[in-house]
């Protein structure tokens, strides 16, 4: 059970989620989405447990 500040990693040791969790749910933070080659595609931002939008990713 994740509660508090945590950083989660995927099998490629890349950050997948970073922020504040409550009952295993990302409440405030970022979720990182990678393509099949491990290249960062987008960063989703969550606030108060809801999706708030994406941040810009430099290519």
Image: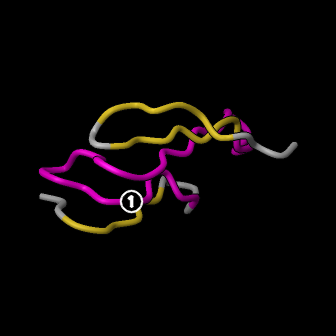
What x and y, as percent, mark residue 7?
41, 65
Is the residue marked by circle 1 packed among few (<14), some (14-19), or many (20+) residues within 10 Å?
Answer: some
What x and y, as percent, mark residue 16?
49, 51
Residue at the extreme bottom of the image, as rendered: 5
Instruction: Give the residue at mark 1.
Output: 19
Determine the main secondary structure of the stretch shown in magenta: strand
Q: With respect to residue 4, does 43 lie above or below?
A: above
Badge count: 1
Residue 39 colored in magenta in the image:
yes
Please give left or right for residue 39 compared with residue 17 in the image: right
Q: Which residues are the magenta region?
A: 14-40
Please give left or right for residue 59 compared with residue 34 in the image: right
Q: Place residue 57 in its image quadrant.
A: top right
Q: Tell me which colouring the rendered structure shows.
A: secondary structure
Quadrant showing the C terminus: top right
Q: With respect to residue 39, does 52 lie above or below?
A: above
- Camera-nearest residue between 57 and 40: 57
Q: Residue at x 58, y 38 (%)?
A: 33
What x and y, as percent, mark residue 17?
44, 52
Q: Residue at x 33, y 67 (%)?
A: 6
Residue 41 colored in magenta in the image:
no
Please give left or right for residue 54 compared with residue 21 in the image: right
Q: Residue at x 41, y 41 (%)?
A: 46
Q: Residue at x 32, y 33 (%)?
A: 50
Q: With respect to residue 20, does 32 lie above or below?
A: above
Quadrant showing the N terminus: bottom left
What x and y, as percent, mark residue 13?
55, 62
Identify the secondary structure beneath mark 1: strand
């Amino acid at each position: 059970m994740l509660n508090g500040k945590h950083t989660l990693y995927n099998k490629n040791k890349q950050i997948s989620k970073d922020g504040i969790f409550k009952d295993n749910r990302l409440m405030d933070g970022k979720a990182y989405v990678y393509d099949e080659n491990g290249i960062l595609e987008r960063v989703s931002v969550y606030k108060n447990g809801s999706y708030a939008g994406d941040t810009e990713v430099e290519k």
